[in-house]
Image (tube, rainbow, N blue to C red):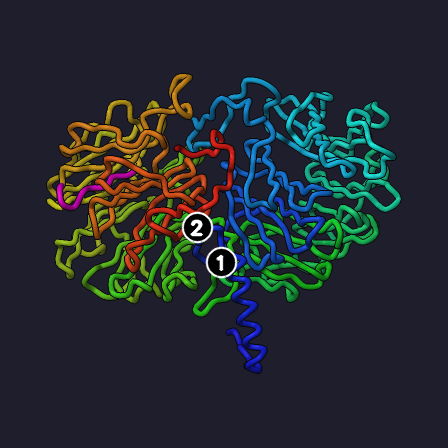
Amino acid sequence: MMIRRSMPRTLAALAALAGLAAMLSAQRHDSWQIIGPGGGGSLFHPAISPHDPDTALVACDMTGAYLTRDGGHSWRMFNLGGTVRFFVFDPREPRTIYAAAEALFCSRDGGDSWRMVLPRADAVRGIAMTDDHAAVSFRVDRGPSGAVAALAIDPADSNILYAALRTGQRYELWTSSDAGASWRESASLPDGASRIWVDPLQKGAPNPDASSLYVAGAKAIAMRRGGRWQIGESPGPLEHVSAGFAASGSLVIYAASGGRIFVTEDGGSRWRESPLPGVNGRAGEIAASGRHPDTAYVSFEGLRSPLHASFGVAKTVDRGLHWQPVWQDTNTLAANVHDAWLSERFGPGWAGAPVGIGVSPTDPNLVLTTDSGRAMRTRDGGATWEALYSKPSARGWTTTGLDVTTCYGVHFDPFDSRHMFISYTDIGLFASEDGGASWHSATGEGVPPAWTNTTYWMEFDPLVKGRAWAVMSGIHDLPRDKMWRRLSPESYTGGVVETTDGGRTWRAANMGMSETAATHILLDPASPPEARVLYVAGFGRGIFQSKDSGAHWDLRNSGITESRPFAWRLARDSGAALYAVIARRSESMPGALYRSTDSAAHWSRVPLPPGVTGPNGLAIDPRDPRRLYLAAWGRIAPEGAPHGVKDGGIYLSQDAGAAWRNVLAEDQHIYDVTIDPRDPRLLYAAGFESSAWRSTDAGVTWQRLRGFNFKWGHRVIPDPRDPGKVYITTFGGSVWHGPAAGDPRSAEDLLDPLLALRPH
């Protein structure tokens, strides 16, 4: 229970103003906002500005990057079209920042906007998005290309950049003397590269090709001194590396190798082991303060000291001669760690030990850590820690802007539209009772533990208050193909749960249904309340039907020719015909579309548009059951096709699927199409190409919603309370809420027109 104490009115007013300032600083540059509880997915690469301790960046593995300018009270999400691998602050120019994603980008305005610097934008002749996640690769006709593995900026001259590029297994060092306008190859790096450091005490204007460099390779440190290279000794694979220059000029490097800690004080020539206290502790991520390298922090797990195995963070202030745990969780949260909703809901072990640590270069007591669901901060060297990803709200928790969650739908109680739910991956179902201002977990009592990971969809009974069904599973991220390549769908867990009290409690409603990753549930509104007819898509099983409100289920696959059909989505037209979307297994094993006119007793195949292998979603005009809108995932195309794929986008049929025509080909990875229930001429779509779309003429033409630029979009859902707004669910960026027509004032994150990683 949270105890709130009263305060004088003046202090209360000041607190309210501070809260307002924090809220305003969390806002984007447009009318969009992101809602949800915050956190919930893995965060990496925290970096604190050397110029301003309140400015920091973190990244996630779901293409989002996040910027704070108020010490983590609020964050702005931005997107560079791919997963960011690291950030580097310019040591001389406070508003210049570099970020390595699918290319190396630079911001000159403190992170508000970004341009490509490697490869050069004028050398790029196109982009390709040929894998299942529409990951971006660049077609470059000249100059350097490849993945940027490491970057360093000369502290004496910000125009001098050193970048390690990886092409296949080959690493090369490239140098720029004009802040990335041009590049030249400087050296081969046979041991690879994960970090580069430049000696800050070089006398006079350094020659870029002769300056002293240190490069962390796979097993050792490569040192360039006086223009000549030498390799230091190896303590083993350098899995995690961090360093700082002491005032004397010596480079102190910390490395974790095989769960052990090693330290070198001579730039990598010789190493000494630096053991953790206790028994069996394994070191993970490690980070030193760049200008105070006597101090470093390391994440650990399995440390038995004195009685229980623990995980957390340890600290040294004497270059690794001694380590002391400053955050030590067991099966309970450490007393000095003040978390938000995640530990309260799942326990401290859910997030685990930090996978990212960022120490301020100028203040060794200021540290950010990131893990499988959170960002945490200490300002006092680890004496206390606080959550930065979420904050308490009136009836639960609300995000600070750090959202790393995949979601499939926003669902509204038909008796109270302010009572709403988000169906999430990894954190399950969340509910709000105040229109999205605050959130709490709704995957609680009665849900089988093996099903709590993901809620794919929810269906309310429009005539019975408090009654709803949800489909849940222990398998996330469907229908992405990575899921069934690792694990057979026949082994998936999941099924249907029912609530009669508005989602406060649940019971499994799975009798007759084999356990399955249930991905969609559909209610027949013509069925009587006492015997609701329900349909469920079971991924790898097929279509299930219940005629008694979910008490019993039967498999209804007659006519479906696929064995183990990847049943993904269901739809019903105004004439009671049912449609089932079967996701594709691969380009050689395409998906399918089926229709039933006899309540799922038998299914007939509906021809897909020529060339289409990846049907993803279907919308049906409520006025005209013959008017269908199909969302499709593209397939790999011969060289020269836009984005390297074809036969994706949005297709329109005016004769119930007998013939189709493509009405949106600019975006080849459309996840779903939705229709505004207030006006069937208004359609929306989203997908994995940094765009959401709107049509005002029943799908004939489409316009991009300006301001939505998250790489992986899922589904657009009209706001039932405000016709001028929509919700957009995403694969890794929670739910966006904003103007239904987009915001014409919105500033784009990427400024290079060709490389904005979205259709035009």
Left or right of residue 94, residue 342 in this image? left
Left or right of residue 487, residue 103 in this image? right
Work out whether residue 427 or residue 174 is closer to the camera in this orientation and state it: 174
Residue linked to disc 1: 399
Residues in magenta, as a range: 617-624
Quick one: label 1 or label 2, which is nearer the N terminus?
1
Q: Position of residue 676 (x, y in %)?
A: 25, 49
At 36% from the left and 32% from the top, the residue drawn is 667
> Are there few (<14), some (14-19), or many (20+) residues within 10 Å of tag 2?
many
Q: Is residue 690 above or below residue 336?
A: above
Q: Mark 1 and 2 residues: CB-CB less than 8 Å, in contact?
A: yes
Q: Position of residue 8 (x, y in %)?
A: 57, 82
Which amino acid lies under the numbered mark 1 shown in the image of this protein? Thr
Label 2 sits on a secondary structure element that is loop
At 21% from the left and 49% from the top, the residue drawn is 679
Work out whether residue 706 or residue 301 is closer to the camera in this orientation and state it: 706
Left or right of residue 38, residue 662 in this image? left
Residue 716's tag is none
**Gap in angstroms between the C-alphas marked 1 and 2:** 10 Å
Residue linked to disc 2: 734
Whether residue 472 is visible: no
Which amino acid lies under the numbered mark 2 shown in the image of this protein? Ser
Q: Is residue 268 magenta?
A: no
**Number of marks drawn:** 2
Label 1 sits on a secondary structure element that is strand
Work out whether residue 487 or residue 325 is closer to the camera in this orientation and state it: 325
Q: Is residue 620 magenta?
A: yes
Work out whether residue 194 or residue 239 is closer to the camera in this orientation and state it: 194
At 51% from the left and 54% from the top, the residue drawn is 401
Whether residue 175 is visible: yes
